Amino acid sequence: LLLEGAGRVIAVERDERCRPALDAIGARYPGRLHVHYGDALKTDWARLVAGISPKPVIAANLPYNVATVLLVGWLESEPWPPWYGRMVLMFQKEVADRIVAPPASKAYGRLAVISQWRTRPRLLFTLKPEAFTPPPAVSSAVVEFAPIERPSPECSARALGLVTGAAFGQRRKMLRQSLRSLVAEPEPLLAAAGIAATLRGEALSVADFARLAYVLERWPAARA
């Protein structure tokens, strides 16, 4: 990034063993590399980049074991629009496919809905294992996320998480059955959202899920 002309890079690194190498890079690019040593899962990202303009770009080859946790945290940032301008992230190819999956596809699920609710994710390219040393067991892919300033219909991340969790937690069941963990009688809730009770979660669009979450937040008999 620095070699390509980035004016300022704020890096988060957990492994202190990387300090000598990062110090050497920082000396090569005075004042342009700022390293925060700590756990990315515990980092206050908005505070870390406070006052930076224009909004920073999140660029990362994410550790596979925490990639989705970090992504969901960034997608659920409040307030919205978020503190970042866009994200360019590397995942396992299988995870990338789930992020960009369309409705009614095998890979479509909670991760696709939450990713496509607030951003426009786009798979940029795929990398084979031999592109890395040592090579991992799976292929990787880079995805760009462009935030949507005002997602429509609007709902809370919590409510969206509840409806997608219920719908995809029992993927083969109709919504009139799978949503019973949220309301005793799902049919009136679904009717209020304009969704057929006989559909399965995989048949709903992202907008359908957001509309259902919006209605759930205002539903008097909701259990959540």
Image (tube, helix red, strand yellow):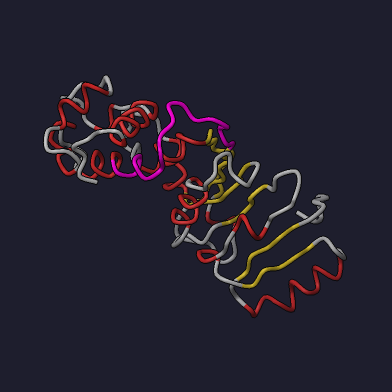
Question: Is residue 174 found left or right of 167 in the rendered image?
Answer: left
Image quadrant containing the N terminus = bottom right
Say which residue appears at 33% left-offset and 39% top-offset: 109
Q: Is 201 located above or below residue 46 in the figure?
A: above
Q: Position of residue 28 (x, y in %)?
A: 86, 67
The number of numbered discs placed on residues in the rendered structure image is 0
Question: Is residue 100 found left or right of 57 in the rendered image?
Answer: left
Q: Position of residue 77 (x, y in %)?
A: 52, 48
Say which residue appears at 20% left-offset and 41% top-offset: 182
Question: Is residue 201 found left or right of 5 in the rendered image?
Answer: left
Q: Nearer the viewer, residue 82 or 36?
A: 82
Say which residue appears at 74% left-offset and 71% top-offset: 22
Q: Position of residue 185 (x, y in %)?
A: 12, 33
Say which residue appears at 20% left-offset and 26% top-offset: 199
**Occupied quadrant, residue 9:** bottom right
Question: Is residue 220 found left or right of 112 in the rendered image?
Answer: left
Q: Nearer the viewer, residue 198 or 4?
A: 198
Specify whether residue 147 is painted magenta: yes
Q: Is 121 located above or below residue 60 in the figure?
A: above
- The extreme front residue here reads 220
Specify whether residue 216 is painted magenta: no
Range shown magenta: 146-162
Q: Position of residue 110 (x, y in %)?
A: 35, 42
